[in-house]
Image (cartoon, grey):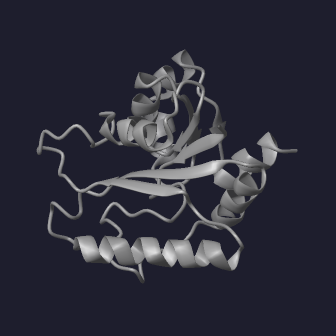
Amino acid sequence: MKLIILDRDGVINHDSDNFIKSVDEWSPIEGSLEAITKLQQHGYKIVVLTNQSGIARGFYTLNTLFAMHDKFRQLLQQKGSKVDAIFYCPHGPDDACDCRKPDIGLYKKVQALFSVNLENIVTVGDSYRDLEAAIQVGSLPVLVKTGKGERTLQEKQSQINAFNIPVFENLAEFVNQTFE
């Protein structure tokens, strides 16, 4: 099965250190929706894994998160595309859950839903915790410089080099270079 795992904030949509707290604040990064559409046209199932600690922190509700995802799905539908699944962690950093990346609980949900081994499945993220989770399950991590990507690159350069993690400007560049 051809499957790709994408982080949400900073990979698909613009991110904020103050959290994306409303549907109005949720806006796609230029080229990201087209990149997802291109992946789907090449036969990939698209799965989004996202930490959403803003729920636990009281910045927005689960209904607001669902509304953001509805907006995302509608924008993709306008391009003739879709995501196959979105899994989220609503917990805060101190909640001791197993689904907050870099833990791998969300990845286990992907394995269960698609009955797939995650080895050699590409995972695109902008934070080191995205990359750590991917490495733990044997996935192939890719870093994009959007969102927190530039900061991740500066702070974790040696680890990124040690794991030979490819780095791209954004999701569109990754997809376009992959399918040229």
Could you tell me which residue is drawn at 62 percent across and 50 percent down? 45
Picture coordinates of residue 6, whole percent (x, y): 53, 48
Task: Report the side of 85 relative to 82 (left or right).
Answer: left
Could you tell me which residue is drawn at 23 percent across and 56 percent down? 90
Question: Hey, which residue is sitting farthest right in the picture?
Answer: 180
Out of 58 and 2, give the one closest to the viewer.
Answer: 2
Picture coordinates of residue 164, whole percent (x, y): 60, 21
Could you tell me which residue is drawn at 67 percent across and 79 percent down? 78
Question: Hey, which residue is sitting farthest bottom in the picture?
Answer: 24
Task: Report the side of 160 relative to 166 (left or right).
Answer: left
Number of numbered discs: 0
Q: Quadrant of residue 28?
A: bottom right
Out of 85 and 133, give the one closest to the viewer.
Answer: 85
Picture coordinates of residue 137, whole percent (x, y): 43, 25
Please identify the quadrant where the N terminus is shown: top right
Question: Hey, which residue is sitting farthest left in the picture?
Answer: 95
Please identify the quadrant where the C terminus is shown: top right
57 lies above or below 87: below
17 lies above or below 110: below
Q: Kindly tell me whether residue 5 is visible in this rendering.
A: yes
Could you tell me which residue is drawn at 46 percent across and 31 percent down? 134
Q: Quadrant of residue 57?
A: bottom left
Out of 145 and 124, give the one closest to the viewer.
Answer: 124
Q: Kindly tell me whether residue 21 is visible in this rendering.
A: no
